[in-house]
Image (cartoon, rainbow, N blue to C red):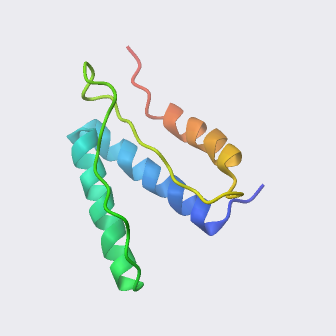
């Protein structure tokens, strides 16, 4: 099944976040991705809601934690399976 443009965009954002998380930590990676998205939205004349990075893993601050927001009927289940496949490539092996 071919993903829609906004689904592909969400996965690309997730991939960039995961890639940067490994190098800079999740909070810095999140800040960079938010900045990139805000710049893109500004060029398109859109305004995004403010976002900040929070993690429930207080004892593991380097554990990436993120939520993808999609509209109702946006294919969240399909995107979840793609995200799992994508995220598996970033798992550190001991």
Q: Is residue 83 left or right of residue 90?
A: right
Count up the numbered dots: 0
- Report the residue at 58% width, 60% height from top: 8
- Report the residue at 44% width, 56% height from top: 13
Which quadrant holds residue 56?
top left
**Where residue 54 sits: x, y (%)?**
30, 40
Residue 77 to residue 50: above or below: above
The extreme right residue here reads: 1
**Where residue 27 sits: x, y (%)?**
24, 43
Residue 53 to residue 58: above or below: below
In which quadrant is the N terminus drawn? bottom right
Q: Is residue 70 left or right of residue 27?
A: right
- Nearest the camera: 65 or 73? 73
Q: Is residue 26 left or right of residue 76?
A: left
Residue 18 to residue 46: above or below: above
- Report the residue at 67% width, 58% height from top: 74
Which quadrant holds residue 3?
bottom right
In which quadrant is the C terminus drawn? top left
- Nearest the camera: 5 or 77? 77
Q: Is residue 4 left or right of residue 63?
A: right
**Where residue 4 sits: x, y (%)?**
67, 65
């Amino acid at each position: 099944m071919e993903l829609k443009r906004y689904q592909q965009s969400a996965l690309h954002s997730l991939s960039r976040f995961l890639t940067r998380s490994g190098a800079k930590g999740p909070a810095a990676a999140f800040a960079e991705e938010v900045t990139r998205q805000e710049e893109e939205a500004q060029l398109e004349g859109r305004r995004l809601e403010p976002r900040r990075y929070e993690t429930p893993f207080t004892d593991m601050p380097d554990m990436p934690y993120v939520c993808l927001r999609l509209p109702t009927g946006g294919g969240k289940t399909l995107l979840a399976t793609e995200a799992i496949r994508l995220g598996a490539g970033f798992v550190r092996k001991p």
